[in-house]
Image: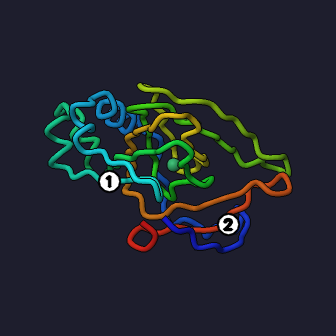
Amino acid sequence: MTATLRPATLSSHPPTPTAPSRPSTGNAAVAITLALRPDFWRPLVRYQEETRWTRLLEDRLLEDVLDPSLHEDLAGAQVWLLSWLPGQGTALHDHGRSAGALAVAHGVLNERVVGAGRGGRRPREAAGDLGVGRVRYFGPRYVHQVRNAGAEPAVSVHVYAPRLTVMNTYRVENQRLEHIGTEQAGVDW
Ligand SMILES: [Fe+2]
């Protein structure tokens, strides 16, 4: 993915026309179910040196492995399988208007989470490792950075609902969370 840099501040986002999606335990259930099925993801996953490898998974693949009780959560969702070689990672980003979940299937990923400071307060930050079987689910205002800081490759499953169309990238500068770019589906990934 290639970010198109467009300096702006977080407060400069255009107004959203409808209410954003909410965090969903359904997303988390789909992500962790798939992550804990190496017989499902191992034949599909690939690794590449240049950049993180990603694959958008087709519904027909997912319906075969997911319990029918989770099929409803697939409607309108998007499921990605990702691999991370040591050192590979993302910029600080959100997921546009999508809620989502990520679950670690193999290895360890380090996640840095940044909450925008309000009323002039500095952004709040936390970081930690996510090992196999850990799942994180979040709403559209969630800003994080994910990286494989370990020595072994990592694999993860990501679920977004509604489908991921935009990702905004950020940096923490002068004790503010600044919006620095936007990546768009069909253009940047
Ligand atoms: Fe993300």
Quadrant location of the C terminus in the rendered image? bottom left
Where residue 173 appears, x then y in whole percent? 80, 57
Q: Is mark 2 within 8 Å of ligand 1?
A: no
Residue under label 1: 55
* Residue sitting at x 47%, y 69%: 184
Return the residue nearer the eye: 1 or 154.
Answer: 154
Under mark 2, the amino acid is Ile
Where residue 131 appears, x then y in whole percent? 49, 27
Where residue 114 appears, x then y in whole percent? 68, 44
Under mark 1, the amino acid is Arg
Question: In which image quadrant can residue 8 be found?
Answer: bottom right
Where residue 55 appears, x then y in whole percent? 32, 53
Q: Is mark 1 within 8 Å of ligand 1?
A: no
Return the residue nearer the eye: 121 or 103.
Answer: 103
On the rendered structure, is 79 left or right of 109? left
Residue 79, labelled with which disc? Answer: none
On the rendered structure, is 182 left or right of 175? left
* Residue sitting at x 71%, y 57%: 171
Question: In which image quadrant can residue 13 be found?
Answer: bottom right
Return the residue nearer the eye: 107 or 79.
Answer: 107
* Residue sitting at x 54%, y 65%: 16
| Image position of 124 with respect to 94: above or below | above
Give the CA separation, mark 2 to mark 1: 26 Å
* Residue sitting at x 30%, y 54%: 56
Give the structural element (helix, strand or loop) at label 2.
strand
Q: Choose mark 2 or mark 1, whichever is in front.
A: 1
| Image position of 105 with respect to 123: above or below | above
| Image position of 171 with respect to 99: above or below | below
Residue 180, labelled with which disc? Answer: 2
On the rendered structure, is 99 left or right of 77? right
